[in-house]
Amino acid sequence: GIRIVQVSAGGGLVRVAHTLMLTSTGRVLSHGTGQYGALGHGFSGGKQLPDVLRPQYIDALSGVRCVCVSAGELHSAAVTADGDLYTWGDAFTGQLGHGDKRPRVVPKQVTEGDFMDECIAMV
């Protein structure tokens, strides 16, 4: 079966919450409130961000091995074995680190900022 090695619960607003889970093989699953894109599954048909009631793998991270996950209030982050940082969800204050305030509904690697040559270990 699947062995979960880390769980991170996010949310804080009324009726807005999500959970990230990291497996022993470096895959990431998420479930909870789909609003704001914090689950990382992207849009469904009709440009909707549906709630996900059972854990689902985040397909956009299937090509990387993650070692750490963190669920924020309306956004999420993951660090890969190579030290790369991926973020997704709401960005109303620039918290994703992509140099803008646009939300991301699937994980995107952070390549902007002062840590271009750094290796991230944990979020």
Image (cartoon, helix red, strand yellow):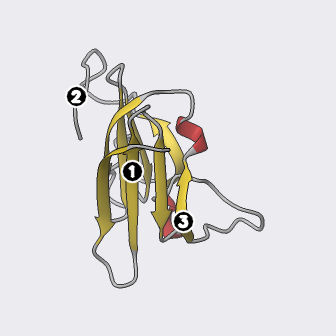
* Contact check, label 3 and label 2, Cβ < 8 Å: no
Foreground label between 3 and 2: 3
Judge by depth and name the residue closer to the eye, 4 or 62. Answer: 4
Q: Residue at x 36, y 40 (%)?
A: 78
Q: Residue 54 got which mark?
A: 3
Which label's residue is closer to the chain start, 3 or 2? 3
- Left or right of 47? Residue 118 is left
Task: Quarter of the image for the C terminus: give it.
Answer: top left
Which label's residue is closer to the chain start, 2 or 1? 1
87 versus 92 height, above or below? above
**Residue 122 percent location from the top left of the image:** 22, 35
Q: Amino acid at mark 1?
A: Met
27 versus 89 height, above or below? above
Q: Residue 33 got which mark?
A: none
**Secondary structure of residue under mark 2:** loop
How far apart marks 2 and 1 lie (CA) works out to 17 Å
**Residue 101 percent location from the top left of the image:** 41, 53
- Left or right of 85? Residue 1 is right
What residue did someone put label 2 on?
Answer: 121
What residue did someone put label 1 on?
Answer: 21
